[in-house]
Image (cartoon, grey):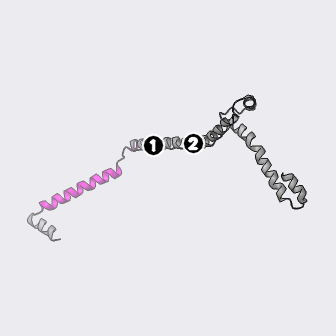
């Protein structure tokens, strides 16, 4: 408070008028910014462009993750089937033709078909083996002969 008193005491009313004028100017500028319309379209366009770019990059990243998830198991199946030479030959050609006639023209359809043909007999055999072992009312000799 002493600083204000010393400021105003050394100057008559001109110091007070200058401070009041600056306060009025600041008030008018702030009210003008609050009530005058601003160019919100440019800020909207900038935020829209930023959001669109973020969505594009996110969509590209999601597509890459999905592609990696799809191709990783298929690539492994393809290498296993290629080593077993199941993707080349007459049986693979016939399977490809059957898939094409059925409407499955995807690149990996033949790979999945051949993998299912390879794995299904073993899976069904294991299921049958487990079913025979769990049968309690079957005579033990019959259970042994069905599992062998």
At which x and y percent is residue 31?
Answer: 31, 53
Q: How many marks?
A: 2
Q: CA distance from mark 1 to mark 2?
A: 30 Å
Q: Position of residue 57 (x, y in %)?
A: 48, 42
Where disc 2 sits, the SS reads helix
- Residue 9: x and y in percent read 10, 67
Residue depicted at 15% across the width and 62% down the height: 16
The image shows residue 143 at horizontal and vertical percentages of: 87, 56
Work out whether residue 94 or residue 54 is closer to the camera in this orientation and state it: 94
| Residue 132 position by quadrant | bottom right
Does the residue at mark 1 contact the one at mark 2 (Cβ under 8 Å)? Answer: no
Instruction: Please identify the quadrant where the N terminus is shown.
Output: bottom left
Would you name the residue on which mark 2 appears?
A: 68
Q: Earlier in the sequence, mark 1 or mark 2?
A: 1
Q: Nearer the viewer, residue 101 or 9?
A: 101
Label disc, if present, on residue 48 of the rendered structure: 1
Residue at figure coordinates x 52%, y 40% from the top left: 60
Of badges 1 and 2, nearer the viewer stands 2
Question: Is 24 above or below relative to 4?
Answer: above
Q: Nearer the viewer, residue 12 or 102?
A: 102
* Residue 12 horizontal side relative to residue 114, left or right: left
Q: Is residue 10 above or below residue 95?
A: below
Q: Is residue 25 magenta?
A: yes
What segment carries the magenta color? Answer: 12-40
Find numbered disc 1 in the image and state the secondary structure of the residue it sits on. Answer: helix
């Amino acid at each position: 408070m002493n600083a204000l008193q010393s400021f105003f005491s050394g100057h008559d009313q001109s110091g007070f008028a200058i401070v009041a004028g600056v306060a009025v100017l600041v008030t008018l500028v702030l009210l003008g910014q609050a009530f005058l319309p601003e160019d919100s379209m440019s800020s909207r366009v900038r935020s829209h462009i930023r959001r669109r770019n973020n969505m594009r990059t996110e969509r590209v990243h999601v597509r890459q993750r999905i592609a990696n998830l799809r191709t990783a198991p298929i690539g492994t199946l393809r290498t296993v089937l290629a080593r077993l030479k199941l993707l080349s030959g007459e049986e693979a050609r016939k399977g490809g033709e059957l898939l094409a006639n059925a409407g499955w023209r995807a690149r990996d359809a033949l790979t999945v078909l051949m993998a299912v043909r390879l794995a299904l007999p073993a899976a069904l055999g294991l299921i049958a083996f487990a079913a025979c072992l769990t049968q309690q009312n079957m005579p033990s000799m019959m259970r042994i002969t069905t599992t062998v």
